[in-house]
Amino acid sequence: MIYIMSLGETKHIVTLKGHTNEVNSVKCSPSKTHLASCADDGTARIWDVTDIHNPKYADDCVILAGHTSCLTGIDWSPNSSLEHNELVATASFDLTARLWDSKTGECLRVFMDHFKHVYALSFSPDGRHLATGGGDGWLHIYDTEVKEKLWSWYTGEKSGIFEIDWHSWGKESLVSVALESRAVAVINFRKITAPQLDT
């Protein structure tokens, strides 16, 4: 179950029911009108939260089905090329990441470049790229327009990627990744140079 609460209040406003196993992540859409969730039941769900006081929203959702194992992460694209639809990406223990149309629930692309669990993913600030990271130690970056892989980086043996975040620094586009080796790698995506490690 998912509880939506108001800050400062002790009682939740609404309960979103539908997942049949542990919910691992929730993310609000850039438009603030929808909530995405993913769970160990192998599905992601898109909830309309424009009027959370309306009881029908507690059961009305778009189900993103297709993964064959637990979902570990979910993210919204901040800028979608689909006509007024917002892209959602999911990561899973089934070794894949998927790109979805959040309005229709259609799977637009399955990325199958990892050979261990996919733990993390993140869209770039402009939505043009998607980064994924997994227990195999690989970081893959995809073009969300053509839906093809652009670049990959290997962290080294026994150094899985557990978290990814994009951020802009002046004219530079940086990708930060949290590694199993207790290091943090910062990669300048525009230059694609060797990452800097902060131990």
Image (cartoon, rainbow, N blue to C red):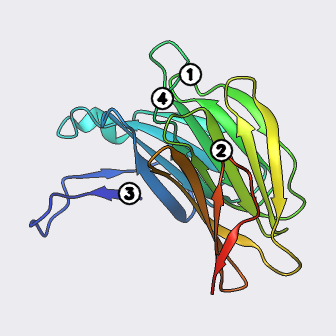
Distance in Å between CA atoms under marks 4 and 1: 17 Å
**Residue for badge 4:** 79
SS state under label 3:
strand
**Residue for badge 2:** 190
Label 1 vs label 3, nearer the camera: 1
- The type of residue carrying mark 2 is Arg
SS state under label 2:
loop
Left or right: where 1 falls relative to 100: left
Proximity of marks 1 and 3: CB atoms separated by less than 8 Å: no
**Residue for badge 3:** 2
Across and down, in percent, residue 167 comes to: 48, 53
- The type of residue carrying mark 4 is Asn
**Vertical side of 94 occupied by 79: above or below:** above
Earlier along the polypeptide chain: callout 2 or callout 4?
4
**Residue for badge 1:** 104
Q: The C terminus appears in which quarter of the rendering?
A: bottom right
Across and down, in percent, residue 131 comes to: 67, 49
Earlier along the polypeptide chain: callout 1 or callout 3?
3
Proximity of marks 1 and 2: CB atoms separated by less than 8 Å: no
Label 4 vs label 3, nearer the camera: 4
Earlier along the polypeptide chain: callout 2 or callout 3?
3
Looking at the picture, tell me which residue is in the foreground, 51 or 195.
195
Left or right: where 133 falls relative to 58: right
Distance in Å between CA atoms under marks 4 and 3: 26 Å
